[in-house]
Every structure is written in structure tokens, then in C-alpha cells.
Amino acid sequence: MSQTIPARESLTERKRRLARQRIIEAADELFAVKGFDNVSVTDIAARADVGRTTFFRYFGDKAEVVFAHEEEMLDRITQFATAESVGPARTTAEAVEQLRPIVVALCDYASDNIDGYALHYELVEKHLELRAHDALKTQLIADRFTQLLVGRGTSEPTAVFAGQVALACYQIGRRRSTSPSQLGAQTQAAFDQLAAL
């Protein structure tokens, strides 16, 4: 029986990934201590031990670093789409149920780093610029849900509606959570409440 051997990461890819990760970690540390407004790109680059040019190779500005984890979430949605062989949803309720385990898994992933999650939402709540960025990233997640469902053969109108409903369940879970560790459970409860309607 043959097994597929995963492709090894090249040295260049590993260096890029590590540099990007150092930038994210440096920014998180600085934002936690100084706040968003009192940290510059130069500060982040220096803390990460990279040049400004390297910083801008990965991020357009310091606001993008705050949302680096959302990019990872978008990648995870794509991974779900390719990992599961699920057929098209025939109804909106079925489409929402197909998205439920994905949304809850993303919530669990987001709250794995409780301190990072708390810092992210603290920064977003305090800065209008970041709230606008958050709204855009959140809509990108809903769009990715739609793409996932359409890719499975679900009609586009159903997929769009289900993507927005699944996103609403996540946002309800986020608002109801008093701590990051509750995000998954509260989001699951929002899906349950929807299913009971």
C-alpha cells in the first residue's frame, strides 16, 4: 500500500515562514506593552530582528500584522474545503449545518492562544481603523464559506445566505463570550439556537 509523503518545506520557505512569525510575535509583544498607537513599523522590525524591507515583504502596514491570524483562518477554511468530500447542500439549513463544524473548529483554533485572542480584540475595540479592517476580514471569511459551499455544488444564492448566517453565529458567539475559552461553545450554542427556530 503506497503512502503519500508530504512535501518537505524548502529552506527558503522555512526562513520566510520563520521571519513572518518573528514579525507577528514581535508586534504582539509590543502591542501588549505599548498599545497600537505607540508602536511603529520600525519598532516591530527591530524587535523581530529584521529590516523594514523584510517587514514590508510580508505586511503592508502594522494594522495588517494585527490580522495575521485571520489570514491563517482563511487558509484553514480552504484546507477544510479540500480535505472533506461533502456533496452539495440542497437547502439553506443543510448548508449552514455543513459550515457549523468548520466555524466551531475555527473558533477553537482562534482561542487556542487565549492571550493573543484577547489582545487582538482589545486592539480592535480601541481603534476605529482596526474595526474597519476587522469588518473587511470578517467579510472575507464569509466569502470563503460561500466559495467552499459553491465548490461542493451548492447553488450560489444558498451558499451566500448560508455563509452570512454562519458568520452571524460566530459573531453572536463572540459577543456572548466572556472569555476566549468560551468562544467555541458560545458559537455552537448560537448554531443550536438557529436550528431550533
Image (tube, rainbow, N blue to C red):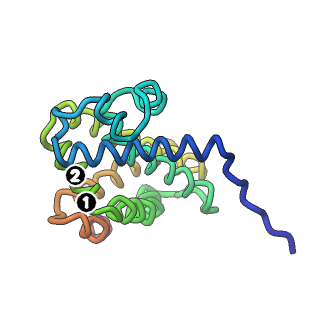
Q: Nearer the viewer, residue 40 or 87?
A: 40
**Secondary structure state at the residue bearing disc 1:** helix
- Tell me which residue sits at (62%, 55%) in the image: 82
Distance from Cα at disc 1 to Cα at disc 2? 6 Å
Q: Nearer the viewer, residue 93 or 72?
A: 72
How far across and how far down the image is residue 79, in percent? 57, 54
Q: Nearer the viewer, residue 14 or 80?
A: 14
Question: Are discs 1 and 2 less than 8 Å apart at CB?
Answer: yes
Residue behind mark 1: 115
Q: Quadrant of residue 97?
A: bottom left
The amino acid type found where label 2 is placed reads: Leu
Residue behind mark 2: 119
| Crowd band around label 2 with a 10 angstrom C-alpha radius: few (<14), some (14–19), many (20+) | some
25 horizontally vs 86: left or right: left
- Residue at the outermost left position: 126
- Tell me which residue sits at (21%, 49%) in the image: 121
50 horizontally vs 191: left or right: right
Q: Quadrant of the N terminus?
A: bottom right
**Secondary structure state at the residue bearing disc 2:** helix
